[in-house]
Image: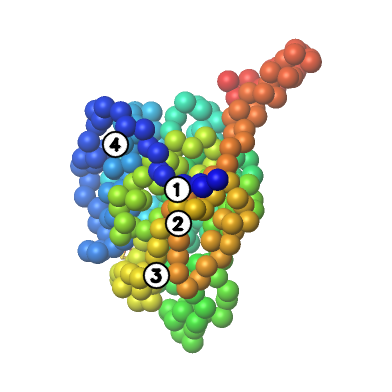
Amino acid sequence: MEHTQTLSVETQPIARQPKDYKSDLEPIWCPGCGDYGVLNALFKALSQLNIDPDRTVLVSGIGCSSRLPGFVVTYGFHGVHGRILPVATGIKLANPELTVIGVGGDGDGYSIGMEHFPHACRRNIDITYLVMNNQIYGLTKGQTSPTSSPMFVTKTTPFGNVEGTLNPLQIAIVSGATFVARGYSSMPNQLARIIAEAIRHPGFALVDVFSPCVTFNKVQTFDYYKGRVYEVPETHDPTDKFAALKLAEEEERFPIGILYRVERPTLDEQVAMIKQRAHTDNPSVEHLFRRFQ
Ligand SMILES: Cc1ncc(C[n+]2csc(CCOP(=O)(O)OP(=O)(O)O)c2C)c(N)n1
Ligand code: SF4
Ligand SMILES: [Mg+2]
């Protein structure tokens, strides 16, 4: 049986155009920053799904990438460094009807925020997590991040980075995320479709996006990615965990698309299930679950 990578966003009358999601604030990213492509792809994805801005929250941490919620007309929460996922989890549990999207950088998510990442994956909280991965700390003017390549020279590693590189896609897959994809900010249409699929996915959806920092990362540039990125083959079965891990392992060329997608109960579904069971077995403990109502 052939498995396809078709990004099957349902067509529906689009009442809102991408420009309708744009706030009055103009982004202040450096000219050419990859994050512009991610923002435009997000506008397109929200429009493709005709998402109601009043029922949507973007949660960010700290970093150039974490400025993004200010540029979108949805609700936004620009929090503290590395705390996107606990805040997003709290918002989703308090009101499961909301569309909750975490947006931030590789430093925010995979360094200071790393203790939250595998747990959000295993809990399968129904949120989308969009990481603008530029392999550097951009806002603080160029230090190595966990996704920086070995021997990468920065102010903090003047003789080259001696540490290995963390693979967020593999960590997400083995930790229990149910949707794992990689995008590239220079492929905005495909990125928009991936983001739309991630939002539609019931469960924790990671979209790690190559989003070059043109000011401080002179290694992983747009030129670097040209010729190295390719679309996930149509024959790839996204439910095959080992095939997904193998694709995520590639270091010379980089597959772009949905690597892994399966379904299992989300955190709020589990909470509802347990609440129901507790009520049936022992109505006297129902008060314990009131905070989830
Ligand atoms: C608790 C805390 N530690 C350190 C900082 C300094 N700081 C701000 S942003 C940042 C890294 C941002 O890197 P990344 O998340 O990759 O975002 P980018 O700017 O590259 O988009 C750091 C270390 C901080 N604001 N708060
Ligand atoms: S420093 Fe880098 S990440 Fe930050 S806005 Fe400039 S190009 Fe983008
Ligand atoms: Mg970064």
From mark 4 to mark 1, how far is it between C-alphas?
21 Å
Q: Which residue is mark 3?
A: 228
Mark whose residue sits in front, 4 or 3 = 3
Q: Which residue is mark 2?
A: 232
* Disc 1 residue: CB within 8 Å of ligand 3: no
> What amino acid does circle 4 point to?
Ser
Which quarter of the rendered picture does the N terminus lie within?
A: top right
> What amino acid does circle 2 point to?
Val
From mark 4 to mark 2, how far is it between C-alphas?
24 Å
Q: Secondary structure at mark 3?
A: loop
Mark whose residue sits in front, 2 or 3 = 2
Tell me: 8 left or right of 148. Answer: left
Q: Nearer the viewer, residue 66 or 238?
A: 238
From mark 4 to mark 3, how far is it between C-alphas?
30 Å
Residue at 41% x, 58% y is 231
* Among numbered discs 4 and 1, the one appearing first in the sequence: 1
How many C-alpha atoms fall within 10 Å of the one at disc 4: few (<14), some, or many (≥20)? many
> What amino acid does circle 1 point to?
Gln
The percent coordinates of residue 275 (x first, y second) are 68, 21
